[in-house]
Each structure stands twice: as structure tokens, then as C-alpha cells.
Image (cartoon, rainbow, N blue to C red):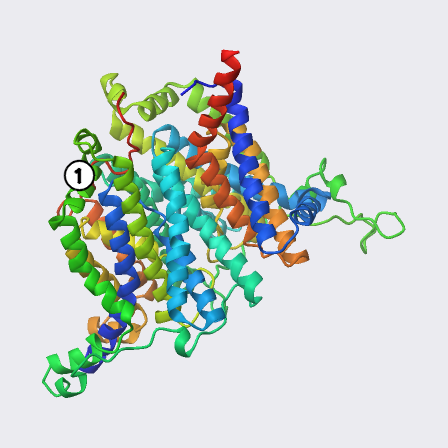
Amino acid sequence: MTKLPTWADVGLVPLISLTLAALVSAGVLLAIGQSPMQALTVMVNGALGSSYAWGYTLYYATSFIFTGLAVTVAFHAGLFNIGGEGQAQLGGLGVALVCLALPWPHWTIALVAAMFGAALFGAAWAAIPAYLQAKRGSHIVITTIMFNYIAAALLIYLLVNVLRPDGQMDPASANFPSGAHLPQFQEIPILQGLFQRFGADGLPRLNAEGLPMYQQVPANVTFFIAILACVLVWVMLWHTRLGYAIRAFGKSEKAAVYAGISPLRIIMIAMLISGALAGLMAINNVMGQAERLVQNSASGAGFIGIAVALMGRNHPLGIFLAAVLFGFLFQGGAALGLETDIPIELRTVVQGLVILFTGALDQMVRMLLGMFFAKKGAT
Amino acid sequence: MDFATFLQISDTALRFATPLLLACLAGLFSERAGIFDIGLEGKMLMAAMSAGAVAAVTGSVWLGLIAAIFGSLLFAAVHGIASITFRGNQLIAGVALNFVASGITVLIAESMFGQGGRTPPLEGAARFANIDLPFAETLGAVPILGPFYAEVISGHTILVYVALALVPISWWVLYRTRFGLRLRAVGENPASVDTAGVSVVRLRFSAVIIAGVLCGLAGAYMSTGLQAGFGREMTAGRGYIALAALIFAKWRPWQALWATLLFGFLQALALRPDVVESMTRVAIPVPFLDALPYILTVIVLAGFVGKAIPPRAGGEPYVKER
């Protein structure tokens, strides 16, 4: 097989994979008698057409950045962590326990403490499959899947029997104290102008106290923490001794062992970081948006992390872009569900197709491109 | 637990165990040939929707069954092409197909029937009827075994008996035929099979196709036997429980039967928390019973109950030497 130039491998392969996924999705829409063009228009309007729409798109993207980074760190160590969903749910538990523990005086203090709780619980949930993989050779893919189900069952039990306040019907924790409220985009001084609401006459709408009113969006300060996490993961993977060891181990376990790298140590550390990143997602959805712990809090973001990592070619910059793309898909899909007859499940199909084309059929794309480049080289 | 309750729960357990057993045997063939199949869940879901939709439109459960096998085979083919032909990552392909199935089943059912992603309720010839085995009435008078035969073994749909019959058949095919020997060899050491002049690609595709047919049966049973129609996400993780059972059974057919019966029994028990409580004298939370198959699988995987060693070449695409 012809070796592709780097730019084609990094840029062209994901782009073609994405196009193929989009084409198949369009085919699916045509097959069920819907118009792909109309669907695209609704999605673009619903996810990118206004600052309000962006507020949702970036909110989802924030979650996906964390879960995407989680999958990536494990991938670089040669481990496929499908357990992001369970780790994110446990992270939510950590956030809830921290937020409900004290009447927090200021959100910054609460945020630091909650991040610690989220990372700790997420990492703990990843630690057991990691240990079993490192010590007993149990396949991490299977154990992390099992741990997703165990996490779901554990959370149902805790929400129904332990965390639910007396007299409340739905299985959810109590609301977090107001001191644990994270500033959302419309509450951040520099950004809030974008979310100002205007009346039909074009003048700013004012509330009873004569202050301007703002659109409420779920995107919050966690978005900036997610960007910081991208940078930190990049530094860790490519500019530290640990990152080198992780990547060396992922490329060849035998060579890494020969170089004195301990498999147990690398598997544990990589999975703990991975679990902590997945857990940190809970800062965004549990603390930043729901402000209480509900059932199935991660709502699939852990799985979308797989698609984001594959699409982003396991690089933090790529993950950032892919996460925004999936944020668009998620919010646009919701708009489809509201405004058209196309079921919201379309986004699950697209998500699956993106994973299929970027993760499993990438060799097909490479072979096709390789034929093209080989021909060009011959002439 | 008195005997009547035990019979009742056993009866439910056998119903619940059937889709698990079929999917588990599907995984058995696939993984024994070296193709890890996370996509059992998706194939079952696709089959359940196809069976539900076609049975609802035509009124014939048999056409529904054929549609189920076809739907499942379609996904199996994609899995095969991705992981055998293009040597892609088998695990990622399976995960991807599960997502596609989860979404596309709702899309198709919604566009066909407009009932919120469900297929219309099935009745009469559009469902598999329960079969009373011969002498169920007369033998019912025999103490202990009689009621067990009449209540638990008899009175299920044809697919339950097909699933049970497939256990010895799978054993025979895998351990007593030339095809089975080659299939197992290709999962352990594909290079040796290749050296012997047998096509690795063809063997692996046969295994994937067998898995597709079996998942088709499992899905058809879900929507036309166990329940009357397809509902979104109706397989509810059964593909993963089947995968767990496969590991529990250490990739062997008879053990697969016992493992799926055990997991089916746990599922049936989870529906009767009152019985569990009266037996153990402490309130066991239902979520714990739900999670028990997964916890047991992790314990088995951890090697505390003997070692579960997967086929050695599992998950690895075979690249022919040049």
C-alpha cells in the first residue's frame, strides 16, 4: 500500500470519512422520504444560527471535549476505554457529593473542589478495569462495558434510596446550593453582550429593575476549562516523559518493556487520567447545567467521546474541532426533532456512521487515496 | 420460594435466556473464528425491528423471521467487510454498528408506522404461537418433574426450542466437523490455516454470517415471541449480556447454555424482588440484581473462577505473508 503524505493522512482521510458518513446519512434520509437539504438547513439554523444556538452547541461540545480527551489518552496507551459513560456518571456523583456537602461561599472554591471530586470518582471507576487489565489480563473493552452497566445500576440505587430528598418523586439528588452555581455565558461580563435580548422594536429588553435581559444558555465557564484540558493533555502526551512512555507503550508493548517502562504503571496511569477526564465532564453537565444529579446524567456523551477521538485523530486540536462538530450535530439533531418529522435519533445514526468510517473503515479510505496518490506518482 | 413460584420464575427465565443464548452462540461462532463481535446488540436490534415491521405489514411471522435474518445479515456483512476485508478495528466496527442500529431502527419504524418509533402491536399469525409439547397434560401428574415439564419446558414458541437445539448442533459443528476444526484454528492461528491452503477470509466470513443469522433469530424472538412488536432500544443491553455470558462460558457451547440460563434466571428474579427478599431475609435492591450478570462477568474475567482465555488470534486482522 502506498504511504500517504502527512497532510493527506491528517487532513484528507478524516474529511473523506466524514463526507462518506454524511452521504450515507443523506441516503438514509432520502430512503425514509425526507429531504437532506431541509434537514441540513434546520440543523445549521438550530445549532449555529444564533448566539442562543451557539450557547447549546458549545455546551455539548464542552462535554465531548472531556470524553474525547479521555478516550484519546487511553488510546495512546493502546487501550480502548469504552467506559467513559460510566466514568462520567460516577464523576457526576463526585460533583454532587462535593456540591451538596457545604454551603459553598463562592463558585470558584466550589469549582475547584467539585473538579477534584469529579476527577477522583471518574478515575476510581476506571481504576478497577485498569488494574484487572494490567494484573489479570482481563480485556479492558469488556470490563469497561460491564462497568458502564454497573455504574448505571449503582446510580439508580443511590439516587432512589440515598440521595433523593424526602418527599421528592423523581430519582434525583437535591438541588445544589446557590454558591455552587457556575457562571453561564450570559453571566460572564465580556460575553454577555452576545446574549442580550431585544424586543420587536429592536430595543434591548429590560427587566423590572431596568437592567438588560439576557438569553439563558447552558454553556458555562467549564468550556474554558475544557480548552485548558486540551492544552494540558497535549503538553502531557508530547512534552513530558510520562507522555512519551504512554505513547511508546501504546505503539509497542514489547519495545516499551525493553526500554524499562513498566506496563502496570503505564496502564494504571493512562486509565486514571482517562477516567479523571471523563469524570470531569460532570462539571459541565451536572454542576454547570442541571445543578443536581439526575439519572443517566451523562446521556451518551461518554460514547460520543469515542467518535470525537477517532474523528479528531487522537490529537487535542482535532478533538476540539471534532467536539464542536458533534456539538453541532447534537444541538442540530435536537432542532430536527423539534421542527421536522425527522426523529432525533438521526444523530445516533450519524454518530455511528462517523465512528464506522473514521474508526473501522479508515483503511478503505487510505487504500482508495493510496491508489490515487500512486497513480499521480507514476506519471 | 415455594415450588409454584419456582416454576413460574423458571418459565420466565427460559424465555429471557433464549435471546441471550442465540446471541451468545452467535458471538461464539464469530469469536472462535477470531472476530470479536461487540455488535451483537446492534444486530439483534436491527433484526427485532425488521421482524416487527414485516410481521406487522404482512401479518406473517415467518416473513418477519426472514426479514430479521436479512436485517441482521446486512449489519454482519458491514462488520465483515470492515474487519476482514479492510482489516479495520473489529471492536470499533462493532461499537459503530450498535449506534447505527440504535438510531436507524427508530428512524425506519417511525417513517413506516409513525407511532413514536414502535411497530404496531402484533397478534395472531404475526406472532410465534406457544407450542404445547406432547404429553404435557398427562405427565403433569408426575411429581416434581411432571409440573416442571408441563410448566417450564412446554408451552414456549418454536424459537425457544430452536435455540436449545442449537446448543448440541453448535457443539457438533465446532468439535466434530472439518469446518468446525478449521473455524477454531482460524481463531487461534490463522497463519497455520492459511499454510494448509484454506482461505482465512472465507472461513471468517462464514463465521460472521452464521453470527448474523443467529442474531437474526435472537432479534426476531425479541419482537415476535417475547414481546408483541418492536419498541425503541428493546434489546436493552442483551447483546452485551450475551457477550458477558460468552466469557462466562469461556467460549464453549454447553457452558453458554448454562451461563445464559443463569443470566436469564437473574433477569427473571429482578422482576420479582418480593421473592428475593423472602429468600434472603434482607432487602436486596433491584438495581443490584440487574447489575449481577455484569458483576459476575467481571469476576470471571478477573480470573477468580478459573481463567477465561479468549481465542488467541481474536481481534487481530489477518495479513497474509508475502
Q: How many labels does the image show?
A: 1
Relative side of A201 to A303, left or right: right
Relative side of A60 to B206, left or right: right
Dot 1: what SS? helix
Q: Quadrant of the N terminus of chain A?
A: top left
Q: Residue B207, how many percent across, how many down?
A: 27, 46
Which residue is located at x 19 percent, y 55 percent? B170
Residue lying at the far left in this picture: please name it: B143
Q: In this view, does B93 lie above or below B58?
A: above
Circle 1 residues within 10 Å: few <14, some 14–19, many ≥20: many
Nearest the camera: A370 or B285? A370
Nearest the camera: B182 or B300? B182
Q: Residue A359, how many percent across, how many down?
A: 43, 35
- Quadrant location of residue B283? bottom left
Which residue is located at x 25 percent, y 30 percent? A264
Q: Residue B55, how many percent across, how many down?
A: 44, 69
Amino acid residing under circle 1: Ala
Relative side of B298 to A173, left or right: left
Nearest the camera: B31 or A63? B31
Is residue A227 at all visible to an observer of this figure? no
| Disc 1: which residue | B185
Which residue is located at x 43 percent, y 77 percent? B123
Q: Residue A328, how many percent across, how many down?
A: 61, 42
Residue lying at the far right in this picture: please name it: A201
Q: In this view, does A106 lie above or below B102?
A: above
Nearest the camera: B161 or B3? B161
**Chain of the residue under the numbered disc 1 shown in the image:** B
Is residue A36 at all visible to an observer of this figure? yes
